[in-house]
Amino acid sequence: MIDDQLPDVEDMQRIAAEVGYSETAFAARSGEGAFRVRYFAPESEVPFCGHATIALGAALAESVGPGRYDLVLNHAEISVTGAIDDEGMSAALQSPPTSSRPAEPALVAAALDLFGLDADDLDGRLPPGLVEAGARHLALALVSRERLSRMAYDLEQGRTLMREHGLVTISLVHVAGERRFDARNAFASGGVLEDPATGAAAAALAGYLRDLGWPHGGSIEIAQGDDMGMPSRITAEIPPTPGSSIRVSGRVRRI
């Protein structure tokens, strides 16, 4: 929703629940080329949502005009650039700063239990981490792509775990190559079983790879949504400066 002012919080939460998608973005003009933005999942507000920002960038390109727009979030200021070409709409965002740290063993154990995994399912090249780029995620890398495809968990148990630890999503990833990852993101904290695309988690993962010294070559591609029948391709560009913003981009389709 793009308007001159934001609705009341209660109305935004109600609308997001009625829409029923992972997030609904609400944007209000706050100056020349700038917008105040808030994101609501069906059951909660989230501080930053990448795929909704990409969608907003395309919507702004269509309704206001292609170009760069400054966005003021609850706890960060970012930007999004929307474009329209012969192939359709696309957008690229600059994320909030990134940070990461190792995940506590008790949290990892609880997450493994949630998904019916054990320690042998984890890829030691990418240890469990709490990763952030405007929102907090738990990243778990799995050895097997087939095991990733079978992701399943109890929504209520996941909601309790994620909210207890301040997690927006739990991101399960499989290393398909040094610069290519498959991902699934459980989003029980917002009342959604799974995201088809999670730009915030993509930015956080990219920052984590940089912190680990992973040979990313300056960018990675994340394949997400395939197991849901909603394939998404996310590109994350990774500058060398630790903690700096990640550029996340993708093409957009109209629902």
Image (cartoon, rainbow, N blue to C red):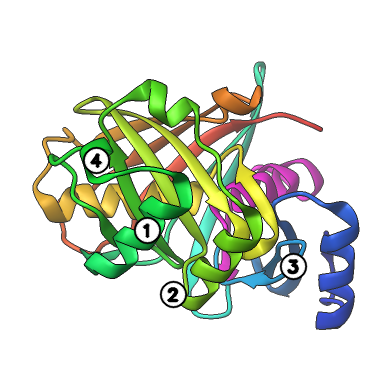
Q: CA distance from mark 1 to mark 2?
A: 9 Å
Circle nearer the N terminus (3, 4): 3
Q: Determine contact: label 3, label 1, CB under 8 Å.
A: no
Q: Determine contact: label 1, label 4, CB under 8 Å.
A: no
Q: Which mark is residue 43?
A: 3
Q: Determine contact: label 1, label 2, CB under 8 Å.
A: yes
Tell me the residue that label 2 is attached to.
165
Q: Amino acid at mark 3?
A: Glu
Is residue 131 among the parts visible in the rendering?
A: no
**Residue under the image location 65 percent in, 22 percent down:** 229
Tag 1 secondary structure: strand
Q: Amino acid at mark 1?
A: Leu
Tell me the residue that label 1 is attached to.
138
Circle nearer the N terminus (2, 3): 3
Q: Determine contact: label 4, label 2, CB under 8 Å.
A: no
Circle nearer the N terminus (1, 2): 1
Residue 162 at what x, y percent from top left? 51, 67
Q: Is residue 241 magenta?
A: no
**Residue under the image location 57 percent in, 25 percent down:** 227
Relative depth, front residue between 133 and 78: 133
